[in-house]
Amino acid sequence: MHVVVIHGWKEETPELVQMLAAALGVMVFEARQRMIGGGPSVVASFADPQHAMALADKLRQGGIAALVLDATAVRSRTGFFIVRRFVPGTYALHIEKSDGIAAEIPYEDMELLLPCTSVTSHTETTTVVERKFSIGKTVLSGGIPMKTKVERQEEVTSEETRKVLYLYADNRPPILFGQDNLTYDGFGSAMKLSRELNFAYLISELRRLSPGAMYDDRLLNRAGQVRTLGPVQNMGTNLDLAAEILARTLRHGRGSG
């Protein structure tokens, strides 16, 4: 699946809204909704990449910057450096994977920090047993109130949220920190009492140590994710896509990548 993303407009003018509505074949109101917040925003998806490129070209000709991403390739990408342990140094961050592979990331090479919230839904089918008043048993018992056991199947949906941080540095693959998967002993005596506090401290320290890096926290909440991905995207399976969209447009705006 190939998604078309619009970005980079300075002002939501009536002319741009009309052009977007005509290009997408939607009402002006719907086009305006997709432009709220200044982008980036997914406006369409196609199985055929040629259709996606044709729409992107049409949008560019109308004055809106657009790009096409292969969403399937982003979701299946295996090139992330998933951090298990880290140690902040004087000039660089030492990071390690769970298999022991390590790297050093100079703070001056850090370009973008994207903290996000991942929401995963789980649905279970449980058996609920209830005891209800039974007229038949009551009659047979001579008027003594009786109950009968009734079983029914019920679906219970729960949500699990976790914080993650995408770090982009130079031309390296994205570096991923998962709040619940990290070992925080690299903080030494500065280590906090909970994963939540340690993760927040990690982000604040990276911001302090890499003042030249951009920081964008819009993917921490569902509203920001919907504005980026559109209402039809599954947030539980498309967080990597949302981060990639932001990374490409933000770094492009800075003149990188």
Image (cartoon, rainbow, N blue to C red):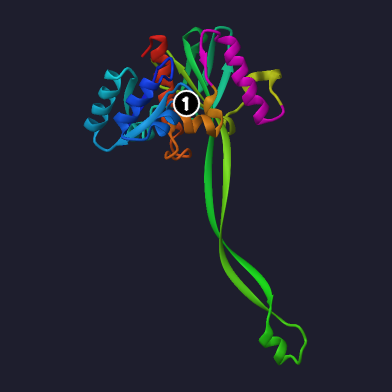
Q: Is residue 203 left or right of residue 7?
A: right
Residue 116 drawn at (x, y percent): 53, 28
- Please tell me whether residue 250 is drawn above or below residue 143 in the rendered image: above
Q: Which residue is at a point 69% across and 87% down the rendered structure image?
A: 137
Q: Is residue 201 highlighted in magenta?
A: yes
Range drawn in magenta: 193-216
Residue plotted at (76% across, 83% down): 145
The residue that label 1 is drawn on is: 36
Judge whether 16 appears above or below 51 on screen.
above
In the picture, measured across the screen, residue 244 lies left or right of residue 188, that is left
Name the element at disc 1. Answer: loop
Does 57 appear in magenta?
Answer: no
Q: Determine the residue positioned at 21% across, 31% down.
A: 50
In this view, the residue in front, 141 or 22, is 22
Q: Decide: is 24 above or below 94.
A: below
The answer to which image quadrant residue 245 occupies is top left
